[in-house]
Image (cartoon, grey):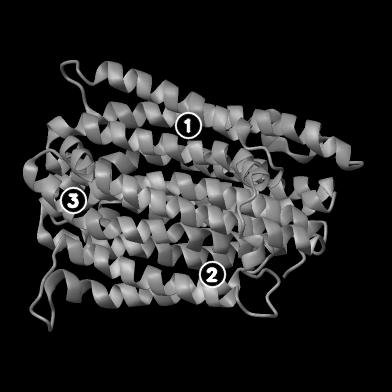
Amino acid sequence: MQDLTTGSIGRHLVKTTGFMLVMMVFQVLYFLVDLYWVGRLGTDAVAGVGIAGQVSFITLAVAQVLGVGTTALVAQATGRKDRAAAQHAFNQALVLSCVTGVLFVALAFVAMGAYTRAMAADAATARLAADYLRWYVPALAIQFPLGTMAAALRAVGDFRRPVIVSTASVLVNMALAPFLVFGWGTGHAFGVAGAAMSTLLPVTLATLLVTRWFRRPDAFLRIDAAECRPVPSEWRRLLAIGLPAGFEFAMMALYQFVVYSVARPFGPAAQAGFGVGMRVIQAGFMPVVALGAAVAPVAGQNVGARLPARVIETFRTASLMATVVMALFALLSHISPEAMVRPFSADAAVVAVAAGYLRVVSWNYVASGLIFVASSMFQAMGNTVPALAASALRTALVLGPVLWLAPRPGFRLEWVWMIAVTMTWLQTVVSLSLLRREFRLRLGGLGDVVPVATTTPAAADARV
């Protein structure tokens, strides 16, 4: 366990972000390795895997519910130096994540055929998407308990172990992918299904390894059968914090679904281009996502320890870090997006769609970075409803115009990207305004604190 309630906030954020970034690099590599090898199978295969990959947004939404609730409850208990409460919250979250994984697999296999047929531009793409999902869905389900255990480790300041596991599992994934996709050395080529298999196997091994750590007698948090009996009141506490954050990701999944749907008349190349562009963004956003994952436990422990000035300092430092990193990524995406997408497709039409997408949406990268930081602060304080409200507003203001414009003659996909950029900046202003209010309402009761208007200029003035 690492105490994040003392010492330099900046040092804590840099250290924990570094650990999280390494872990997330390898997590995103799961997708990029699959996409790299699948790209050699043709445009239909890329489009199929892209459609299948959208299911990951649903699982991210569910994993966010579990992870955010776990992090908030365990971090605040750790900040209060209440090990028993942290232990109880962790075991309850782990049981809930296992139950959720079983339900997810059952529902996914029932809906798989209808989903792929509805989303794909043609029958070949639908078949390839289904081939991938049959192996990819179990891998996603296993990550529910794995993600919960990782969230608990982050909450107590242990970032090293998740990094070790992620690194090892992706190395296995990278080694297996070409053998399973193309049948190197075996003569048994599984195609897109092989790409999913190369993810399932290392994720399973990683989960087993992390579980062993939580069984050690000297572990700060341990898997305890006596603590695993479902306690509805504890599940309600976790879900009250996690559900709003999960709905944020669900709305992201809805956005992806709508974009794939309106892109369908433009053919597989348009769908594949959007899928490739999204993968590049996932990679480029890793630093700010890692920062957000670091902000929640750092601020959360300080909320539990009743140190409001350190909570606000966490927000100020993280906002500056996010702005610098995302501005650099935006510049790269605007200047040379083609160089970032060509490794994943040789099809000129796919590259053109992906590059055009990146050039337009690069204008909202800084705004997105600030939204990530604000959302993490809401998580740390145990109230994620304001973040959900801001995200819901943005989603409604994007999807409404898109659905109205899509059936009309002359509709272009670029219109979707431009609407999304505008509404992302609006969400940033709303999020920061709500965060300023949350600081005033929640931190004021923890002790003396410097006025928010002088300590969080980004939130106070909404100059974004």
Residue 329 point in image, percent of width and height: 44, 51
- Identify the residue at horizontal 60%, vertical 76% (top origin): 215
* Mark 2 touches mark 3? (CB < 8 Å): no
Q: Amino acid at mark 3?
A: Ala
Q: Amino acid at mark 1?
A: Thr
Question: Mark 2, residues whose alpha carbon is within 10 Å: few (<14), some, or many (≥20)?
Answer: many
Where does label 3 land, which residue?
130
Disc 1/disc 2 C-alpha distance (Å): 31 Å
Asked whether residue 1 appears in the rendered view, the answer is yes
Residue 163 point in image, percent of width and height: 52, 71
- Return the residue nearer the eye: 349 or 267: 267
Where does label 2 land, which residue?
162
Where does label 1 land, which residue?
424
Sequence-wise first label, 2 or 3: 3
Q: Is residue 322 above or below residue 396?
A: below
Asked whether residue 298 appears in the rendered view, the answer is no
**Would residue 86 be found to the left or right of residue 82 on screen?**
left
